[in-house]
């Protein structure tokens, strides 16, 4: 019974592309594959953005430390 309700729910899932709603079940296998590829790339972009934020924070800390070192010498 649970399996049938999951299949029913999956069949009614939709995605919005350029303002249009599409049922995932109506998309071709190729279209679903491209969607999967886009989702994978979106996850990678989010990971890289998070890494960049960490690096920018570290750079700011190094710049603050450098300014402190320069101020001590003058």
Image: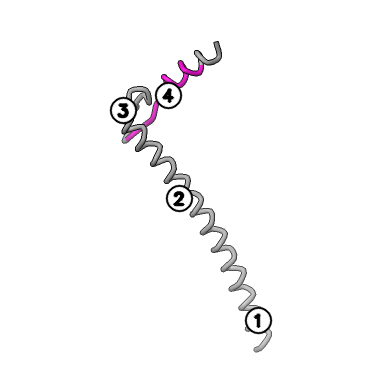
Q: CA distance from mark 3 to mark 1?
A: 61 Å
Q: Which residue is mark 2?
A: 45
Q: Position of residue 44 (x, y in %)?
A: 47, 49
Q: Which mark is residue 56?
A: none
Closer to the chain start, of discs 4 and 2, is 4
Seen in the picture, residue 1 relative to 26 is either above or below; the reply is above
Q: Closer to the N terminus: mark 3 or mark 1?
A: 3
Spatial separation of the CA atoms under disc 3 and disc 4: 14 Å
Q: According to the image, label 3 marks what residue?
A: 28
Foreground: disc 2 or disc 1 = 2
**Distance from Cα at disc 2 to Cα at disc 1:** 36 Å
Q: Are marks 4 and 2 in contact (CB under 8 Å)?
A: no
Instruction: Mark 2 and mark 1 in contact? Answer it, CB < 8 Å.
Output: no
Q: Is residue 66 above or below residue 74?
A: above
Label 1: few (<14), some or many (≥20) within 10 Å? few
Mark found first going from the N terminus, 2 or 1: 2
Q: Is residue 21 left or right of residue 71?
A: left
> Is 70 inside the magenta-drawn segment?
no
- Mark 4, residue position: 13
- How far from the left and from the top, in percent, is residue 9? 47, 19
* Callouts 3 and 4 close, C-beta under 8 Å: no
Q: Which mark is residue 69?
A: 1
What residue is rendered at 36% in x and 35% in y? 33
The residues colored magenta run 6-17
Dot 4: element: loop
| Residue 2 image-quadrant placement | top right
Tell me what residue is drawn at x 44 percent, y 43 percent: 40
Q: Is residue 38 above or below residue 62?
A: above
Asked if the magenta segment contains residue 10, the reply would be yes
Residue, x 62% and y 68% (percent of image)? 61
Q: Secondary structure at mark 3?
A: loop
């Amino acid at each position: 019974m649970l399996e049938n309700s999951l299949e029913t729910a999956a069949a009614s899932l939709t995605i919005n592309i350029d303002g249009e709603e599409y049922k995932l079940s109506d998309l071709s296998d190729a279209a679903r594959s491209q969607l999967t590829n886009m989702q994978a790339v979106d996850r990678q972009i989010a990971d890289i953005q998070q890494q960049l934020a960490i690096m920018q924070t570290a750079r700011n800390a190094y710049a603050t430390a450098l300014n402190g070192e320069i101020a001590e010498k003058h």
